[in-house]
Amino acid sequence: MDITKQYREQQEAKQLQSKISAFIGDFRIGTLLNKSGIRKLRGVSPLKLFEVIFMLSFEGVRFSQGIVKNSSIGFQKDAAYDFLKNPRHNWRAFMLSLAAMAVRFFDVLTGEEREKVLIFDDSTYDRSRSKVVELLAWIHDHNRGCILKGFKLLTLGWSDGNSFLPLDFVLCSSAKPEKRIQGIRKNLDRRTCGYKRRLEAMAKSTDHLEEMVKRVLNRGIRADYILMDSWFCFPATLATLGQHLPVISMAKDVPKVLYRYNGQWVRLSKLYRLLRKRPGRAKILTSVVTKTKKDQQIKIVFVRHRHKKRQWLAIVSTKVDLPDEEIVRIYGKRWDIEVFFKMMKHYLNLEREAQLRDYDGMIGHITIAMSRYIFLAIEQRRHDDPRTLGSLFFACSDEMKDLTLLEAMQRILSLAMEKIRSLGIVAEDVALALVDSIMCVAIEMLQSGQRLFRNNNVVLTI
């Protein structure tokens, strides 16, 4: 029994290695690394380093066990650390290029009528046990309701309602200097990617949203809406992002955020009380088209809270002509990014795999961890979507339809003539006469078959 289990595990490991190798080859990981300025300086190649780090979570080992204490990988730990910590490596360009290729793969499998969405959300990057990590700060964890040491991982993702892909991220420290435990510890050239990303980390998270959307759209990634949680739903943010794509967001009742209704400015809870509700146990309670302080017209849909009686949730849409049901349905796609964060933390070792103190090292490691998720998303789609195999079948069918019966016979007879000429046994005139006779018989048979087909159709019609 143990032998059978061991053999099965070995076969699964071989299949996984084969799929990862195919992924690295099909998506030209080596080329993307090179174009992103991640090139070989000495020793082992960046592609080899990427592949070894990429495999760690699938092998069930951490950075120390799989690289630091592993003498069979062909390079020392310093090579892996230098690979991750180099401030000149443009990890953002690499991730955007890889994600753009994956989006094009999913676009082939997704109908034009299905909405594609961009999703914003942030999650804690916990470093509670750390003391000297670069740009470490005190942050508030909304889920646990406490203050901890770490970062905020602001992420922009893409979804078609079936598959989710991370596109871009910012590892945010705190915008307030008094909340930052550590500052910048490297003396960097201001032109490097590492210096620019450190400046991003010390800015407000809402300041990054528009630039992230612009970068994604400039890569040719198509989307129909932007989805956000209530933490980002402010009039200024809605107005800024609404210039690029329609925005659908959860709204929260904040005293300073007011909406215009019947000539007066009211907060969200008062606006709900002023509206007429649908009777019975309707899931959608009411909706209204209103304006924000930025003079932007929006639509607010109030839905019943599933877990709290007499409570409601509000969803805001900058596209006011959308039906209420469509707004609620499209916003439901935002849940994909919650699944993404859980997968990244619990299964892909986002926080626990490598205890890096260098900010560039954390950026590089997060990028590789998100690349693992892109790989898993592609493999899941290939497994679940029959069109991944069907597209190959239809492509082969189209290729066969292009070759008609007459063209096939011409090719065969041409090959036969070449064979006869090379042998020199039969005179060419005799061979041509033989071909003509064969063609005449074939044409007569085709014409007879067509007449028989027409006669059968007439009999069936009668």
Image (spheres, helix red, strand yellow):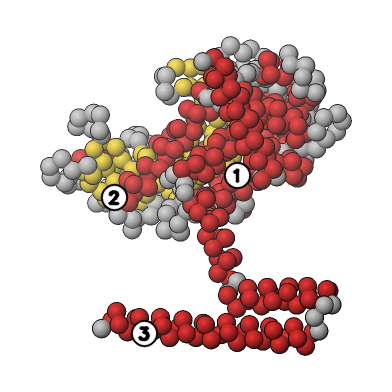
Q: Earlier in the sequence, mark 3 or mark 1?
A: 1
At label 1, the amino acid type is Ala
- Residue 272 appearing in the image: no
Do residues under tags 3 and 1 come within 8 Å of each other at their CB atoms? Answer: no
At label 3, the amino acid type is Asn
- Residue 197, compared with residue 457, is above or below; it is above
At label 2, the amino acid type is Glu
Residue closer to the observer: 17 or 185: 17
Crowd band around label 1 with a 10 angstrom C-alpha radius: few (<14), some (14–19), many (20+):
many
The CA distance from mark 3 to mark 1 is 58 Å
Disc sitting over residue 325 in the figure: 2
- Residue 382 appearing in the image: yes
Residue in the picture at 58% in, 75% down: 405
Residue in the picture at 37% in, 42% down: 332
Percent position of residue 298, x then y = 36, 51
- Residue 261, compared with residue 139, is above or below; it is below
SS at circle 3: helix
Percent position of residue 371, x then y = 61, 36
Q: Earlier in the sequence, mark 1 or mark 2?
A: 1
| Residue that label 3 marks | 455
Residue in the picture at 62% in, 48% down: 101
| Residue that label 1 marks | 99
Disc sitting over residue 86 in the figure: none
SS at circle 2: helix
